[in-house]
C-alpha cells in the first residue's frame, strides 16, 4: 500500500502562495488547508488577507474565518483542526494542500508538538535561586549531564534558562527532554511530505507588500479595525499586522499616512522573519517566482506525486 503524499506551500507574506495554491488544487483536484494563524479569524478578512470568496470558490478551502476574534488560538488547537480537515480530505480520495506562512503552525504539523509539561514556577524559582545565591550554573549543568547527557551536550552551561527547563521537564514528568522529543511524531512520520517554498528577490517582495497594504487601505482597512475596536479582541487576534498600527491612528497616536508606512515597515520585517524561519529547513524545495512560472511549479509537483 502506497503512503499518501502531503503537499505544503510555504513562504513569506505577499509572495504569491494563494494564486499558486488554487492552480495546483485545480490540477490535482485537491483541497486547501490554510496554515495562517490569522486567517482562521472571522470578521477581519482585510487584516488577515484571507482569500476572498471568489478565490475560495475556485477550490475548497479550510480553516478560514472559523472562529471569533474574541477567542485565543494557538498551534496546538490549529494542529487538531488541521489534521481533522486533512483526514476528511484523504478519506474522500482527494489531496490536501497545506498553504501558509505561519512557520510554527507548519512545524507543528510536519514534526509534531513537543509534549512538554506546564511551567513549574516553584521549581524554576528554586533553581534560579541556586544560581543567584551560589553561582551554581556549572553544577546545574552537571546535574543535567547525569539525567540527560544528550540534552546537556546541546545546551551550554551558561544557558541557565534552557538548563533549568530541561531539569524542570524531568522533575515534572520523570522523563528526559531527549526522551520526550524522540516520542514527538508529526506528519513526516506517517506520510510522504513535499514542502515547496516560494520566494522572490527582496526588493520585488517589498514592492508587493507595499502595494498590498495600499490595497488593504482602499478595501476598508480603517473601518475594519474601527469595528474590531468596539468588540473584545483576543491577545492572539490583536497580533495581526495592521491592527495596532491603525488603532494607533484612530486613537490619535499617528497620522493615517504614518500608520500606513509603519504597517508597511512591520510587514516587511515580518516577511524577513518568515524567510529566516523557512530558510533553516533543508527539506524545502525553493522556487523563485520572479524566474519560474506557476505552471512549471505545478508540473514539478504533479510529476512527483504521480
Image (cartoon, rainbow, N blue to C red):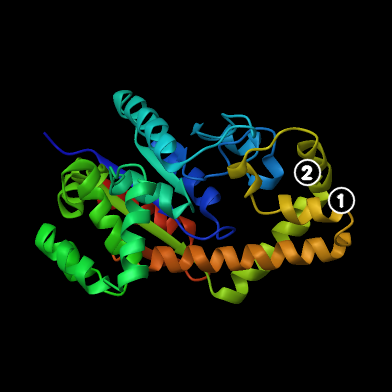
- Is residue 26 in sight in this rendering? no
Q: Is residue 167 left or right of residue 61?
A: left
Above-or-below relation of 175 to 90: below
Tell me the tag on residue 225. 2
- Is residue 234 in sight in this rendering? yes
Residue bearing the label numbered 1 = 250
Q: Is residue 32 left or right of residue 241?
A: left
Question: Along the polypeptide, which appears first: circle 2 or circle 1?
Answer: 2
Q: Residues within 10 Å of mark 2 (few under 14, many from 20)?
A: many
Residue at 81 percent of width and 55 percent of height: 248
Residue at 26 percent of width and 42 percent of height: 187
Above-or-below relation of 57 to 121: above
Tell me the tag on residue 36. none
Rendering coords of residue 7 (x, y %): 34, 46
Q: Residue furthest front?
A: 133
Rendering coords of residue 21 (x, y %): 48, 47
Q: Nearer the viewer, mark 2 or mark 1?
A: 1
Secondary structure of the residue carrying tag 1 is helix
Residue at 23 percent of width and 55 percent of height: 167
- In which image quadrant can residue 184 be found? top left
Rendering coords of residue 138 (x, y %): 22, 74
Could you tell me if the residues under marks 2 and 1 are in contact, i.e. CB atoms within 8 Å? yes
Q: Residues within 10 Å of mark 1 (few under 14, many from 20)?
A: some
Q: Is residue 207 left or right of residue 134?
A: right
Per the model, the C-alpha gap separating discs 2 and 1 is: 9 Å
Name the quadrant of the N terminus: top left
Secondary structure of the residue carrying tag 2 is helix
Name the quadrant of the C terminus: top left
Rendering coords of residue 240 (x, y %): 63, 49
Tell which of 177 and 134 is nearer to you: 134
Amino acid at each position: 500500500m502506497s503512503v499518501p503524499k502531503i503537499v505544503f506551500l510555504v513562504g513569506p507574506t505577499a509572495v504569491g502562495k494563494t494564486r499558486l495554491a488554487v492552480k495546483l488544487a485545480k490540477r490535482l483536484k485537491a483541497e486547501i488547508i490554510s496554515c495562517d494563524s490569522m486567517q482562521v479569524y472571522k470578521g477581519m478578512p482585510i487584516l488577515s488577507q484571507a482569500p476572498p470568496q471568489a478565490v475560495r470558490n475556485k477550490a475548497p478551502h479550510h480553516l478560514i474565518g472559523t472562529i471569533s476574534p474574541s477567542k485565543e488560538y494557538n498551534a496546538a488547537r490549529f494542529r487538531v483542526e488541521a489534521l481533522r480537515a486533512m483526514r476528511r480530505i484523504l478519506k474522500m480520495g482527494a489531496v490536501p494542500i497545506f498553504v501558509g506562512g505561519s512557520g510554527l503552525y507548519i512545524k507543528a504539523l510536519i514534526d509534531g508538538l513537543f509534549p512538554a509539561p506546564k511551567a513549574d514556577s516553584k521549581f524554576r524559582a528554586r533553581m534560579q535561586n541556586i544560581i543567584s545565591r551560589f553561582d551554581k550554573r556549572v553544577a546545574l549543568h552537571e546535574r543535567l549531564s547525569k539525567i540527560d547527557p544528550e540534552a546537556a551536550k546541546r545546551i551550554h552551561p551558561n544557558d541557565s534558562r534552557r538548563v533549568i527547563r530541561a531539569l524542570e521537564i524531568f522533575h515534572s514528568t520523570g522523563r528526559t527532554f531527549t526522551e520526550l522529543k524522540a516520542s514527538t511524531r508529526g506528519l513526516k512520520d506517517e506520510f510522504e511530505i513535499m514542502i515547496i517554498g516560494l520566494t522572490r528577490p527582496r526588493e520585488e517582495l517589498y514592492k508587493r507588500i507595499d502595494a498590498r497594504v495600499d490595497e488593504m487601505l482602499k478595501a476598508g482597512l480603517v473601518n475594519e479595525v474601527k469595528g474590531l475596536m468596539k468588540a473584545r479582541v483576543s491577545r492572539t487576534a490583536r497580533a495581526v499586522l495592521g491592527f495596532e498600527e491603525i488603532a494607533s491612528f484612530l486613537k490619535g497616536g499617528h497620522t493615517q499616512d504614518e500608520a500606513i508606512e509603519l504597517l508597511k515597515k512591520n510587514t516587511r520585517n515580518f516577511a524577513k522573519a518568515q524567510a529566516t524561519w523557512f530558510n533553516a529547513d533543508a527539506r524545502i524545495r525553493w522556487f523563485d517566482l520572479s524566474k519560474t512560472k506557476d505552471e512549471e511549479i505545478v508540473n514539478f509537483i504533479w510529476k512527483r506525486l504521480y
